[in-house]
Amino acid sequence: MEDFEPTALGVPSPFASASPRLTARIAGGLYFLYIATTALATYLRSALLTGSADSTAHNLLARPDVLRLAFVIDLVSAVLFFFAAWALFALLRQVNENFALLFLLLNLGGVIVQAVNALNLLSALQVLNDPNYVSSFSANQLQAIAMNDINLYNNGFMIAQVFFGTWVLPLGYLVYKSGFLPRFLGALLMVDALAILVWFSQYFLLPSYSLLSYPALAVSFVAEFGLALWLVLKSVKVRTPERIAGTGTDQPSA
């Protein structure tokens, strides 16, 4: 792999005061935090949202604090994801700033959809608890309205995947072309873009064939977890001033 050139662009970076290796590790660490918080929020939701209107309503009424906690963690996860993308933008903008800006904006689009969509979960909880609703609708009607809000949340979550699927395409291209990160990670990320779009298409076009999405989800996990792991453990190769001058002497990098 080629070495990272810290000052390839004359434009100051948001991480200008940090070394490239530190920027890479910050990006990887934020990505790991995003993955962990997303997994935690998903676990909390799955404990409540069983798919059955009756049991789901019972769970939401019995443990509303769990759903509120999942809501807050979802928002924290969205912010962490954008910060991870921002750090990756600072790291990869020297390869091609237009593509780096593209993946940052696509990530932001997905984060906005995800954050706004989370309101549907609170809406389901509100319907079941609000005295105005409770006095106006029967129990079955309240459960049906709550389930509709939950279905809207699921649909909104999948709409966000359009942005999260397309952002990894320019990201993977830049990783592939960078020279200071392994090409196999870049190729895997570009395959990840296709895999997420397959998942999106299966959900809306072939909802009865959820098995089709399992390979796509596996590819997505390996690609994005692999990127985060590499950034944290291996970081990037840095071209030190001595090597730029042609002395051939490697100096340890921060």
Image (spheres, rainbow, N blue to C red):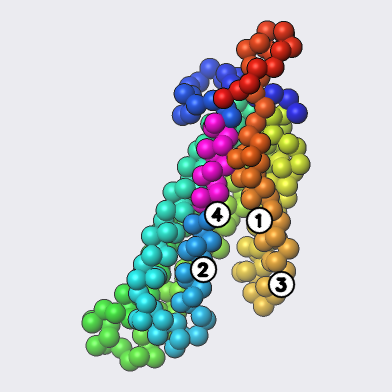
Q: Is residue 216 above or below residue 231?
A: below
Please tell me which residue lies in front, 195 or 183: 183
Q: Could you give the CA–CA distance between mark 1 and mark 4, rounded to whole angstroms? A: 9 Å
Which is in the foreground here, disc 1 or disc 2? Answer: 2
Residue marked by disc 1: 221
Bin the neighbour count of mark 1 within 10 Å (Cα to Cα): few under 14, some 14-19, many 20 and up: some
Please identify the quadrant where the N terminus is shown.
top right
Label at residue 35: 4
Residue drawn at (67%, 78%) of the image: 208
Q: What segment carries the magenta color?
A: 22-34
Element marked by disc 1 = helix
Residue drawn at (63%, 62%) of the image: 200
Residue marked by disc 3: 211
User: Amino acid under label 1?
Assistant: Phe
Element marked by disc 3 = helix
User: Amino acid under label 4?
Assistant: Ile
User: Amino acid under label 2?
Assistant: Tyr
Q: Is residue 131 above or below residue 113?
A: below
User: Amino acid under label 3?
Assistant: Leu
Which is in the foreground here, disc 1 or disc 3? Answer: 1
